[in-house]
Image: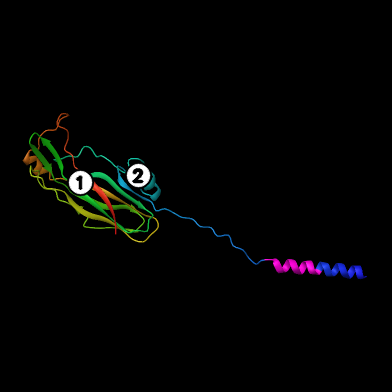
Amino acid sequence: MKKIISILIITLLAITLFAATGQGDTTLTLNAAQAGKLYHGFTEADNTTANDVRDEISGALEGDYTVSGINLEGTGAQSIGYYNLYTTGNTQMDVTFTVTPLSLTLGATTYYVPYALGYTSSSGNSTITVAGSGTIGSATVATTTDPGSISGVVLQTTGNGLRWQTLALEATVAGALNQTFGLPETTAGTGQFEGTIVALVEAL
């Protein structure tokens, strides 16, 4: 009987000691950092989803695009592609377009063809505001005096997380006036009239 009592006392003591040295709940904490992404650029076709925008302009060229076949004596707006913006950063930003006229230098004379750049919302997730009047510059008669470049804010971001937007772009020239002016011929030797639209993303 004494032996049984001794065994019970030792067992109870062991249980008591084990309970005294135990712990309550423990926690494993997981942390993860996420870098913001910013892709933007010009494309020939419209991208109608955020994934399309990301996949199309995250490559080596990052949205550089050349449009050929602009009719300098045409009437009406001419489609020239799309601008795309994709961002997941928290910083708010503006997108500014700087438009330079089409130009061609022959000898000592440079000919300039101004145009109006039109832009309208095409696709997006409503977290980016299309800014400005929808037009930068104006379609005026060709000239040999440099009219200079003109800039305007076209997009402004709001909120955070995924934000994306595409703009449909059009160029309008003063075709009838350019015919009256008499633009010089372009050949393989002279090259073509060339102008640029530069998109600049600026953090606010």
Residue 157 % position (x, y): 32, 58
Secondary element type, mark 2:
helix
The residue sitting at the top extreme is: 189
Question: Which is nearer the eye, 20 or 110?
Answer: 20
Mark 2: few/some/many CA within 10 Å (<14, 14-19, 20+): many
**Does residue 191 lie above or below 16 as drawn?**
above
Q: Is residue 190 left or right of residue 56?
A: left
Q: On residue 171, which mark appears?
A: 1
Secondary element type, mark 1:
strand
**Residue at figure coordinates x 75%, y 68% from the top left:** 17
Q: Which residues are magenta?
A: 12-22
- The amino acid type, in three-letter code, at marker 2 is Ile
Could you tell me which quadrant the C terminus lies in?
bottom left
| 20 part of magenta stretch | yes
* Residue 74 visible in the picture: no
Please count the marks in the image.
2
Q: Is residue 82 left or right of residue 19?
A: left
Task: Examine the residues drawn in magenta and state their main secondary structure.
Answer: helix
Looking at the picture, the colour scheme in use is rainbow
The residue carrying mark 2 is 57
Residue 126 % position (x, y): 34, 58
- The amino acid type, in three-letter code, at marker 1 is Ala
Image-quadrant location for residue 23: bottom right
Q: Is residue 200 left or right of residue 91?
A: left
Q: Earlier in the sequence, mark 1 or mark 2?
A: 2
The residue sitting at the right extreme is: 1
| 115 part of magenta stretch | no
Image-quadrant location for residue 21: bottom right
